[in-house]
Image (cartoon, coloured by chain):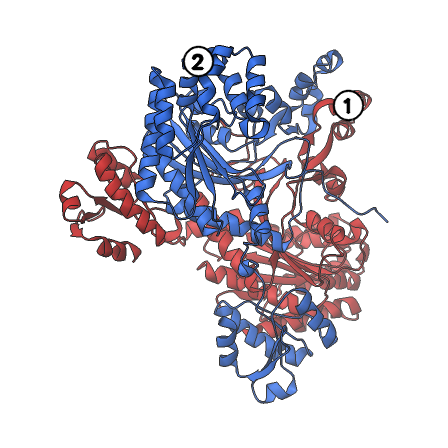
Chain colours: A blue, B red
Amino acid sequence: MSKKPSIPKGTRDFNPEEVSRRNYIFNAIKETFSLYGFQPIETPSFENSETLMGKYGEEGDRLIFKILNSGEKVKKADLISLEKGNLARFSSSLSEKALRYDLTVPFARYVVQHQNEITFPFKRYQIQPVWRADTPQKGRFREFFQCDADVVGSTSLWQEVEFVQLYDAVFSKLGLKGVTIKINNRKILSGIAETIGAEDKLIDFTVALDKLDKIGEEGVKKEMREKGISEDALQKLQPLFSFKGSNDEKLNSLNGLLGGSQLGIKGVEELKFITKNIETLGLQTASLEIDVTLARGLNYYTGAIFEVSAPAEVNMGSIGGGGRYDDLTGIFGLKDMSGVGISFGLDRIYLVLEELNLFPETVSENSKALFINFGEKEAMYAMKAITKLRNVGIKAELYPDATKMGKQMGYADKRNISFTVLAGEKEMESQSFTLKNMKSGEQSQVNFSELEVFLKS
Amino acid sequence: MSKKPSIPKGTRDFNPEEVSRRNYIFNAIKETFSLYGFQPIETPSFENSETLMGKYGEEGDRLIFKILNSGEKVKKADLISLEKGNLARFSSSLSEKALRYDLTVPFARYVVQHQNEITFPFKRYQIQPVWRADTPQKGRFREFFQCDADVVGSTSLWQEVEFVQLYDAVFSKLGLKGVTIKINNRKILSGIAETIGAEDKLIDFTVALDKLDKIGEEGVKKEMREKGISEDALQKLQPLFSFKGSNDEKLNSLNGLLGGSQLGIKGVEELKFITKNIETLGLQTASLEIDVTLARGLNYYTGAIFEVSAPAEVNMGSIGGGGRYDDLTGIFGLKDMSGVGISFGLDRIYLVLEELNLFPETVSENSKALFINFGEKEAMYAMKAITKLRNVGIKAELYPDATKMGKQMGYADKRNISFTVLAGEKEMESQSFTLKNMKSGEQSQVNFSELEVFLKS
């Protein structure tokens, strides 16, 4: 006897309830993407290695799952590199394809490859799994879905406005109130770095600032000092650490702080366009908040930066994020293609909805009624009714075997099917059905039309 | 400048129209699965190698995509096997995980692993991609979706009856009339082999018989002779080559042909149960036809065998298939778990619907209206209307830039958006909108409620 089988660490099986709940979230996101004019594309699960390698930094290259060449091709193994301990090169000699690491690089590849068929501005969404050879831990998986929407080919800030509305629309639809959409602008971060004379340390500066929530003012300052940012610069930064008030007030302080930085002022103007127009249009349940510490560690953002926080009562961190990038497709040779996009964190949204009990009971795709099987003749009587019910869209099923009634009732119970239908000789004679409510135990005798009306409701 | 990027051979990008059309088919299948009481599960894209290897024969093992171990693990490369030319063993030493080759083995693994949480009979469906390192050719890909529904844990033939109904329901829903559901029974094939004294050559016998459509009577006989089936046996087989008439007539001839084979008679009885009950229940647009040459080359079927043919006017071959297997989960140590299942061939169904022009025009998730952008003030006026339209589920979008009208109109045209909405100073003053039909060129001035009613229809 073989031992009980298992799945690779960091991967998951999803049972029917989990699939239904995940689909509930996917559908809310998809419907909203579509409502906002985004159209779906799909790309292959694996890409040519050269498409992915070198796009995510050294760490990223290590975390990309490589596909072993098939058949004779493995003979080309570069054994000299193996001997020398150059494992990356050895691995490359064995692999020409790799699993998608995110949806952004494949999207850039798609845009460049299909640029002549695409109508720009191109509004696309993409919901597909990605794979990372990361160390699995709570909430971090080796296979997980990303849900991205991007527009490429226009620099209009109305798109940022719409993305804020879109976040609000999705979370409102999911019943998740009190979400905070934090917004910042890379130009402001650059402007601040410029003003304090630390342009060359922009990355160090933003990485440290990004940690304000976690390590506090003193921690951030310590890290900045270690990275060589001067006391004088830290002095100038002081207002950032006590940045409060309405979005308008924050924009005003920023104007002061940024002094003469043209780039910084441009960032403030962009932010102002977004916050002002969102204020006019209104949001359903979310709020939009300027957060100058928001950097998302991502080097490729050039304008707006978004991050969505779950309501304060759940301790979950970011459930979505995105921003404006000015040169996404440059890596594949297509220059000057500005884009802006956002992403939803499915797994975390799932945990938040679960914790707050926000999944509707009707999410699961369960049958409305189980017909009890009393034998061949009775089963045919039941199947005729079931066939008619299915034709009008009512989910019903027959217990396949004419086994003990207790077992059949137990099945309905475990499957959480609310009603059973009993039809034996007596019912067949009077062309009726006995309908039993599995919760209350109540029974009533009905004809077919009554059954249909009842189960439809 | 880098060269234009591409994707691995045998894989595909799907553009918005293709994704929408594929989803149209997926949704018809999913809704019907669900209507029949099947519930969705999902399994990881990759499994532990030992779960997959050895389950699909030697050829299958070669076609499984293996994932290269990450980091230091590649040091364990078995160089001696490489030297000896044992490439399979060399590859195994570099890989512990492999991409899903079909949905059946992962399903068996799922059932065994989760047997204590599952309520049997377990009706599950699964729609996920699979990967095969096959030589790509027209209609054969290295990444493609499978759509499977199976029941495990019951031997009831009502399930076979329901699968016939299910096929009919899906293809009727897709508007694909004239589909033929062919049915056979492995027990009949075994019975015939027994009767002609060729039990030990059952596989050779069925593989040859399966080719009747392609190579004709003489071809089949030639192949059988080559495999050592006697002239006497071929003589007894003769009625099979001119097997005609209604299902009832075929069942009668089979009874004659099978003589004393108990197993064969059992198969005939099973077939009779299915055809008789389907006749009573009726089908919407498909027909059910006994085909004793149907073997599907698959060794694990033990009872019913299904195959669905597209309407005769399209030259496509099988668009679905399945059958009963008595020991699916035995490979993972769980015995006596009978199952029966069917599968839909998405890519071929797509081609058939395309060829017969059966995709509804409304399949694509396109916006109903594009609002022309005349500048910041006008864009805000438009965005207010768009926001309200989206709140009631109407897909509308704003052209992001206040660029030339011709360009914006051209965009609507290329994106196939049927209506544009123009709102400049004049419309803003009178709180109205100019609605333009992009096909007819017709224009009319409407207020917001009129616009909403119009776009909703």
Neighbour tally class for label 1: few under 14, some 14-19, many 20 plus, Cα within 10 Å: many
Q: Residue furthest right?
A: A1
Q: Which mark is residue B418?
A: none
Q: In front: mark 2 or mark 1?
A: 2
Depth check: give the residue in front, A279 or B170. Answer: A279
Residue type, label 1: Ala
Chain letter for the residue marked with disc 2 in the picture? A
**Which residue is under mark 2?**
A196
Left or right side of A297 for B415: left
Q: At 67% across and 68% down in the image, what residue appears? A: A413
- Going by the image, does A129 lie left or right of A168? right
Would you say residue A63 is visible in this rendering? yes
Q: Which residue is mark 1?
A: B77
Q: Nearer the viewer, residue B442 or B386?
A: B386
Instruction: Quote the CA–CA distance across marks 2 and 1.
Output: 53 Å
Residue A121 in sight from this viewpoint: no
Q: Position of residue A452 (x, y in %)?
A: 50, 76
Seen at 60% across and 29% down, the residue is A98
Residue A344, placed above or below residue B445: above
Examine the image and state in which quarter residue B143 appears.
top right
Q: Indicate the position of residue B8 as horizontal and vertical percent values.
A: 55, 30
